[in-house]
Image (tube, rainbow, N blue to C red):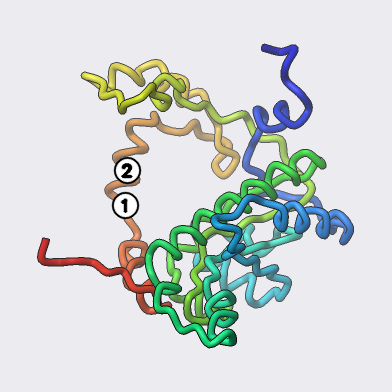
Amino acid sequence: MNNIINETIQKQLEHRTIREFKDQKIPEEVFELLMEVARRTATSNGMQACSIIRVTDLEIRKKIAEICNQEYAARAPELLIFIVDQYRNYQIAKEKNCFEEAAKDMDRFFQAFTDACITAQNVVVAAESMGLGTVYFGSILNDSEKICEILKLPELTFPVVGLGLGYPNQNPQLKPRMEMRLRVFENTYTIFENYLDEIKDYDEEMCTYYDLRDANRRVDTFSNQVVSKLKNSIPKRQEILNIISKQGFDLKINRDK
């Protein structure tokens, strides 16, 4: 397999989350190139229904970091927020005297949500190919309503994921992942008789990993992490559908069924 691995794939195989960056700005021409990669990313129906907020204001960064409960979000040289953006196309349609409510439906929401995810990942691959480090902030959804308020997001927009970028100032251990036989199936979904048996080796491997957020302590087994995450849910994240609705999207949930 090694003879078919190119530099980009090698970078992807070595992907690590970077949380500490050098005090070094990303050159503007590098940033512009990353935005060109974002512009050329695949997009559902060609509608380009996601946008990016480049957060440069330190006070706004601090507010976002507080929501994320990750103070380093404020310190990343670049902080980007990828958003669902059906507002722009809705306004274009209105200016063409088209007032279709379909702009607010869940199909359009998920098209834009998927666009935002794909775009963020494309930027990550490009950034890492140029020697930059990256960190995703899914934690912006800890309080999506507050993020909408802070970023002044209009109707028919919604935050999807944050992304920190910069030159790495740490070299984390490569985090173990479970075998792909547990995640890649042929034709139909594969159900295993006993999942704890299937991930026994992976559980043991996880105990060899040190997360630099607590570098003196090895992480727990994956199975224990699954349980702890389920027991420690974040209330505001359970209200996300309500916030999506407040942002003007029609959930069309039939509660009678």
Q: Could you tell me if residue 10 is visible in this image?
A: yes
Say which residue appears at 75% left-offset and 52% top-offset: 37
Q: Position of residue 253 (x, y in %)?
A: 23, 67
Q: Could you tell me if residue 116 is visible in this image?
A: no
User: Eyeballing the image, is 163 above or below 218?
Assistant: below
Q: How many neighbours does mark 1 have within 10 angstroms: few (below 14), some (14-19), or many (20 or more)?
A: few
User: Eyeballing the image, is 139 above or below 123?
Assistant: below
Q: How many neighbours does mark 2 have within 10 angstroms: few (below 14), some (14-19), or many (20 or more)?
A: few
Front-lying residue, 107 or 26: 107
Residue type marked 2:
Ser
Which quadrant holds the N terminus?
top right
Identify the residue at the far front of this view: 97
Residue type marked 1:
Asn
- For label 1, the SS is loop
User: Eyeballing the image, is 226 above or below 123?
Assistant: above
Residue 210 lies in quadrant: top right
Q: Is residue 221 left or right of residue 89?
A: left
Front-lying residue, 46 or 148: 46
Q: Position of residue 6 (x, y in %)?
A: 76, 24
Q: Position of residue 53 (x, y in %)?
A: 65, 69
Residue matched to label 1: 232
- For label 2, the SS is helix
Residue matched to label 2: 228
